[in-house]
Image (cartoon, rainbow, N blue to C red):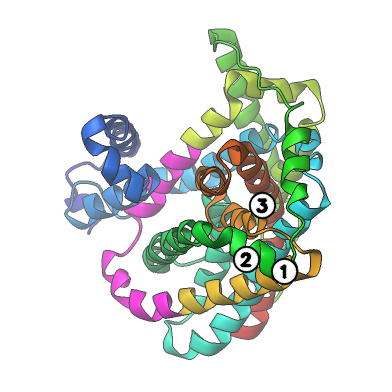
Amino acid sequence: MNASAALITDPTAVFGYIAAVAGLIFWASTLPRFRKLFALTPPVIYAYFVPTISAAVGIIPGDSLVYGWMTRYLLLVALILLMLSVDVKSILRLGPMALFMVVAGSVGIVLGAVVSFLLFGAFLPEESWKAFAALSGSWIGGTANMVAIAESVGTPDALMGPIIVIDTVVGYGWMGLLLFFSAFQHRFDASINAHTEKIEETNRRLATVAEHRHPLTTATSVIIVGIGFGSAILAAVIGDRLPALGDPTIISHTTWAVLIVVTGGLALSFTPVSRLEEYGASRFGYTALYLLLGAIGAQANLRAVIEAPAFLAAGVVWIGVHALVLLAAARIVRAPLFFFATASMANIGGVASAPIVAGVYHRAMAPVGLLMAVVGYVLGIYGALGAAWILGVIGG
């Protein structure tokens, strides 16, 4: 769609439209009548595809100056606010078995990316390795990592549509299987003589973790926004002055900026600044992320979703390799099926899905799923960059 032919062309108005769409979607997700719909397909999917359709029918342009601004800065804002909220002490209380399984799941995602690309790369569009790199980001930690890696390697907008389809269809299909497997957890645990006492031990450790929430004030809101945008601009300026690395480029100027805010955010999580999470700092981060997804969706080529069948087959193989690696890890440390399922969803589904799967296996263990997902999120940017590097060597 030609930018001048769109109904809304002013960059500020385009930003307002995307924000309004995101607001309407999340408002609808709170209504009882839409509860089943959003249980099957989370709001984040609509936050991406509604702007895609809007651009395709000419409501907003497929190309606008505001998209570049949103992609450059909102990603960095989201990452710094999400990372400074990480509770590393609580993560360490999970114990070695839980941490080992999450790391094994991440290794399985990296290995699965390589195997599936080697098998299906010849049947996919040019530069599809960049799409695989972006999906590896999503499947080691979540949507923010997907966007970060996509920006890092320069994933074409046309390939983002199929990636979102795989992420949704294959990812949530696997989640359904994991929920189904919960009925067989006792049989599985008995077959490998699993250390089921580790679940009770982990639960006891988490009993000491208290959640503190405070009402959000105007002063705190301004502080959170100031830290988010101030850090984003500082990281972008420093990143622009650092050299790009790799052939093809994997560590770009954008990657440097991402690494700066991720590492800096983790460092801040050990300081009093992390207490901003008690006022909802991560919620501001997710808001920036959902707005960013709308901008990415508006630039996507809707017709590229036709390529999804080949991508979907690659996605199934990818998840299969991930599952085999996790199964081997579970047998090595005799981990209960609970840790297999929760570690898998901690990587692939992130903080939105892992607590659900954990709660189905053991009702009181949903917080374990949340913390394991945070582990995956921390590993995400580093692990996915490693996957991108390997994929770049193979496909670049």
Q: 89 above or below 166?
A: above
Residue at 32% in and 43% down: 38
Magenta stretch: give its range: 288-313
Q: What amino acid is at disc 1?
A: Ile
Tell me whether circle 2 and circle 1 mark residues in contact (CB < 8 Å). yes
Q: In which quarter of the image is the N terminus?
A: bottom left
Q: Name the residue under label 3.
A: 376
In this view, the mark in front (3 or 1): 1
Q: Tell me where residue 99 appears, x and y as whole percent.
A: 76, 52
Secondary structure at badge 3 equals helix
Q: Name the residue under label 1.
A: 192
Report the front residue among 347 and 356. 356
Q: How far apart are marks 2 and 1 (CA)?
A: 7 Å
Q: What amino acid is at disc 3?
A: Gly
Residue at 32% in and 30% down: 30
Q: In which quarter of the image is the C terminus?
A: bottom right
Residue at 45% in and 67% down: 156
Q: Mark 2 points at which residue?
A: 188
- 153 left or right, relative to 39: right
The answer to whether residue 381 of the structure is visible from this angle is yes
Mark 2 neighbour density, 10 Å: few (under 14) some (14–19) many (20 or more): some
Q: What amino acid is at disc 2?
A: Phe
Q: 64 above or below 268?
A: below
Sooner in the amino-acid sequence: mark 3 or mark 1? 1
The magenta stretch spans residue 284:
no
Tell me whether circle 3 and circle 1 mark residues in contact (CB < 8 Å). no
